[in-house]
Amino acid sequence: MISRHVDRDLDVEVRAALHIGLYELLFSDGTPNRAAVASAVELAKPNLGFKLVNAVLRRVIDDDGGKLRLPADDTPDGAAIRHSHPLWLVKRWWKWLGPNPTRALLAAGNRPTELVLRVNTLRTGPLGEDGAPAGGIVVPGEPFDDALPEARRVTGGLDVLADPGWREGHYVAMSRGSMRAARAVDPQPGERVLDLCAAPGGKTTHMAALMGGEGTIVAIEKHGGRARALRRTCERVGAGNVEVISGDALEVELAAGSFDRVLLDAPCSGLGTLASHPDLRWRVQERDLPELGRLQGRLLEVAQRAVKPGGRLVYSVCTLNPGEERLPEGKITRLWPHRDGTDGFYISAVGG
Ligand SMILES: C[S@@+](CC[C@H](N)C(=O)[O-])C[C@H]1O[C@@H](n2cnc3c(N)ncnc32)[C@H](O)[C@@H]1O
């Protein structure tokens, strides 16, 4: 809409003020048009571009009645604008999935995601027959997914960090897709498990809980700050059987065939998580995808060497991009935001 009225480059603060003004005009029913224009003009000041902000917003009101005119989503170009996703991504999904699933996926990317907690049985003790922790500890939310008895859906929001239950490690906030990946590993008490790309540790700590804290999880994380945060998370949730290694999984020495189970939750483009990371769609660059694919391939070789013969190997990515899918011979689980209401995931499990 801006480019219909302006044909020159705008200072960033002028463009930002226009974005906010347009948002208020077009989407925010409660704001009178005059107030939307006045506040956007104030935002742009002292940049002299405030005059242009005033002019453009008034033109939008005069020409379009302050109403949004969006193209139909019957072509990738129209859908990209209508659903506010980058065109390269819409084209890829369109080709891969077809028009209807793509439109549904794009719409899901603009809806708030569900807030889901995982009951941390390492702190709460086991779940009773009614699904609640048998020891009487109360965790916010309701059980809602038969495949994941530990999952709780919270409606109406929750200030997790201000909640003593969070500090005491009674639960971990993580998506159901992540829980499905940890469960696909199916780690057993007493086993030796490798988690190659571990931070922030939702899946590491979930696996620790599934193992009842018995056995060992070697959790590797390349980024020092994230590895330190992972250690703190493990302490908070009582995952005493996790050994965090701060290092590059491509370089850490791992004895071949020394793990019963290996999880490679690989760094990925994250295109399954666009609803929970609204800025991500504009940060992922199509040109970065091949390099990411190569890294995933190299990490998978490390994972394949580390798992013992007949052991289980799980490859997971929270993206929706065939170029990042690996281990096609495994048992494959796919989660779709528009179908399953959780982050999009590809999970493949072999062996075990
Ligand atoms: C998808 S995230 C993992 C999420 C994690 N498994 C969880 O459930 O919370 C990928 C992680 O891999 C880390 N990473 C990227 N390259 C790595 C490498 N070569 N070795 C180890 N970790 C790496 C990133 O820093 C990031 O924390």
Image: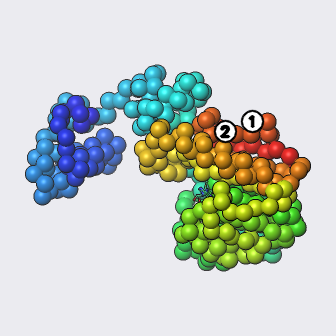
Report the Cα–Cα distance between label 1 and label 2. 7 Å
Which quarter shows the N terminus?
A: top left
For badge 2, the amino acid type reads Glu
Q: Is mark 2 on a helix, strand or loop?
A: loop
Extreme residue toward the top, this view: 74
Percent x, y of residue 78: 41, 26
- Secondary structure at badge 1 equals loop
Q: In this view, does 176 lie to the left or right of 124?
A: left
What residue lies at 72% left-to-right and 59% top-to-bottom? 195
Disc 1 target residue? 328
**Residue 226 falls in image quadrant:** bottom right
Q: Which residue is found at the position 19% from the left and 48% from the top?
A: 11
The residue positioned 73% from the left and 71% from the top of the image is 243
Mark 2 Cα shell of 10 Å, populated few (<14), some (14-19), many (≥20): many
**What's the residue type where badge 1 is placed?**
Pro
Q: What residue sits 67% from the left and 50% below the top? A: 299
Circles 1, 2 touching at the beta carbon (< 8 Å)? yes
Q: x, y (%) of residue 350?
A: 82, 44
Vertical placement of 18 versus 159: above or below? above
Tell me the colour scheme of the image. Answer: rainbow
| Left or right: 55, with 321 as reference point | left
**Residue 328 appears at what percent x and percent y?**
75, 36
Residue 283, numbered circle: none
Quadrant of the rendered structure where residue 292 is? top right
In front of the other: 307 or 172: 307
Q: Residue 325 carries which label?
A: 2
